[in-house]
Image (cartoon, grey):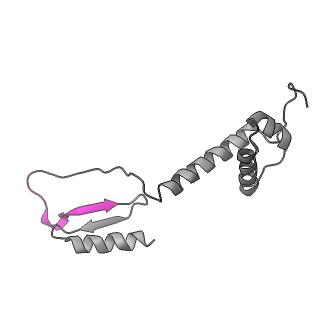
Amino acid sequence: MTEREEVKPGRRRTRQEVERLVSEFVASGLPRGEFCRMHGMTFGTLERGLNRERRKSRDIQTDGKRLVRVKITGRSGTVDRQHLCGMTVVLANGRRIEFNPDFDAAQLRRVVETLEGF
C-alpha cells in the first residue's frame, strides 16, 4: 500500500475486537497510521478505542471515587416545618435521600455503608 492510498472502512468491528486491537497497538510500539494500515482499520476507530481505554483506566484508578457537584440551598425567614429537612441528597437518577434535621452520625454512617455496598 502506498502513502497515497486510503484505507477504506470495512465492516463494523465489535467492541471486543477494537479492545483487542487497541491492546495490540499499545504493545506493538508502531506509529498509529502504520498500525491502522496493517490491520485495515480507520484512524478514528483506533482513537475511539484508545479514548475508551483511557476512561476505563481512569475510572479504575479512582476506585469509583469521583467528585460530584454539590448545590447548597436554603431559605431565610419562615420555613414550612412540614417540608423541613436537615439534608437532602439527590442522585443522578432523580432519587432523593432525605435526613431529618436531628439525624445523627450513626444514621449517616449506616446509609453510606449501605450505599457503598452497591
Dominant secondary structure of the residues highlighted in magenta in the image? loop
Tell me how many marks there are.
0
Residue in the image at 79% along x and 49% along y = 12
Compared to 74, does 30 lie above or below?
above
Give the image quarter of residue 26.
top right
Q: Position of residue 21 (x, y in %)?
A: 76, 49
Left or right of 52? Residue 83 is left
Residue 54: x and y in percent read: 59, 47
Which x, y percent locates residue 95?
38, 64
Q: Looking at this rendering, what residue extends furthest in the top direction?
A: 4
The correct choice, above or below, for 82 with respect to 36 in the image is below
Please identify the quarter of the rendering in which residue 96 is found: bottom left
Residue 8 among magenta residues: no
- Give percent across and percent down for residue 79: 12, 58
Q: Is residue 4 above or below residue 61?
A: above
Please state which of residues 40 and 33 is positioned toward the viewer in this rendering.
Answer: 33
Q: Quadrant of the C terminus?
A: bottom left
Q: Nearer the viewer, residue 116 or 25?
A: 25
Q: Front-most of 30 and 75? A: 30
> Where does the magenta region start and end?
73-90
Which quarter of the image is occupied by the N terminus?
top right
Viewer-proximal residue among 27 and 4: 27
The residue furthest right is: 1
